[in-house]
Image (cartoon, rainbow, N blue to C red):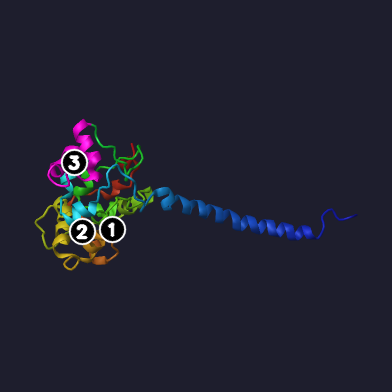
Amino acid sequence: MAQIFKPSANSITAATLLSVAIGVPTVWLAIAGLSRSPANTKVNVPLNQPVPFSHQHHAWELGIDCRYCHTSVEKSNYPGVPPTETCMSCHSQIWTNSPLLEPVRQSYETGQPLKWNQVNKVPEFVHFPHSIHIARGISCNVCHGPVQHMNMTWKGNSFQMAWCLQCHRAPERYMYKDTTRPDREPRQQVFDLYWKYQQDGLTKLSPVEKSIIIGGFNGSDDPAHIEAGKRLVKAYGIKVQQLSDCNVCHY
C-alpha cells in the first residue's frame, strides 16, 4: 500500500506544533503587555488642556496648598476641580495680559466653565472616595505620582484592580506616621509632607517620605515598617478583612 503522506509531512507537523506552542503564549504575552502599556493605560502621557496648567509652578515653585484648588479632597469622593473664580483670584492681579490665560479670562467673562480633560479616571462601576484615603494618611503622590513636579499633568499609575489590591490586601505596607510631628492627624500629614519638602528638600525626609515625594512608593517590605503599619491599621480602625471584598469598591 502506497504511503498517504510524504516523509516531509513529519517535518511540517513538527514545525506546526512548535509554532503553536511558541506562538500562542507569545501572542498572549503581547496582548497582556499592550494592555498594561502607556498606549492603553495612558500612564506618563500628558494630556492637552485648554490652559497649560503647571502643578510644578503652582504647587512647588509658589507653594500653593493642594486644597486651595481641590477644595473637597478631604471631605468628598471627588477632589474637586477649581472654578474659574479660583484661578482669577490670582490672575486678576498677575499675568493679566498673558495670551496663555485668555481662555481663563473668557471663561470668567462669559460664565462658561473651562472644559478640562480628565487625566485620572476609574470606571463608572468603581467607587473610589478620596476622603477616606486622605483620612488614613495616604499621600496624593502614592496614586498620582510626583504631581508637584508635573508641568503638564499625566497619569501616575494604571489604576488597574491588581494595583489597588496590593494595598487593600496588605495596607500595613503603605501606612506610615511622621514621627517628627506625632501630634498631626493623618490627613494633615498628607499635606505637611509637601511643606517639609518645600523647606528642606529631600535631606530631612525619611526613606518612605522620599519615595512618596518622587512618586515611587509601592509599599515597604521592611519588617519594622510593617510592624508599625499594623499598629496604625489598628489605631485607624481599618478592617483589613473587608478591604478585598468586591462591594468595597464596586457598586
The mark nearer the N terminus, 2 or 3, is 3
Helix or strand or loop: what does disc 2 sit on? loop
Specify the label residue 72 is tagged with: 3
Report, in whole angstroms, how far the alpha carbon at label 1 lies from the one at label 3: 23 Å
Label 3 Cα neighbours within 10 Å, binned few <14 / some 14-19 / many ≥20? some
- Residue contact between numbered discs 1 and 2, judged by CB atoms under 8 Å: no
Measure how far apart labels 2 and 3 are at the Cα level: 23 Å
**Residue that mark 2 sits on:** 176
| Among numbered discs 1 and 2, the one appearing first in the sequence | 2
The amino acid type of the residue labelled 2 equals Tyr
Q: What residue appears at the point 77 percent right and 57 percent down from the top-left corner?
A: 9
Q: Is mark 1 in CB contact (under 8 Å) with mark 3?
A: no
Q: Main secondary structure of the magenta part?
A: helix
Q: Is residue 249 toward the left or the right of residue 234 in the image?
A: right
At horizontal 69% and vertical 59% (from top left) the residue drawn is 15
Q: Is residue 244 in the magenta section?
A: no
Which secondary structure, mark 1?
Answer: loop
- Amino acid of disc 1: Gly
Q: Is residue 108 left or right of residue 27?
A: left
Distance from the alpha carbon under mark 1 to that under mark 2: 15 Å
Point 22% across, 35% down: residue:
107
Give the label, 1 or 2, closer to the camera: 1
Which span is picked out in magenta?
A: 82-111
What residue is shown with label 1? 215
Q: Residue at x 58, y 53 (%)?
A: 24
Q: Position of residue 132 (x, y in %)?
A: 21, 45
Residue 152 position in % (x across, y down): 29, 51
How far across and how far down the image is residue 5, in percent? 82, 55
Q: Tag 3's secondary structure?
A: loop
Looking at numbered disc 3 in the image, what kind of residue is underneath it? Ser
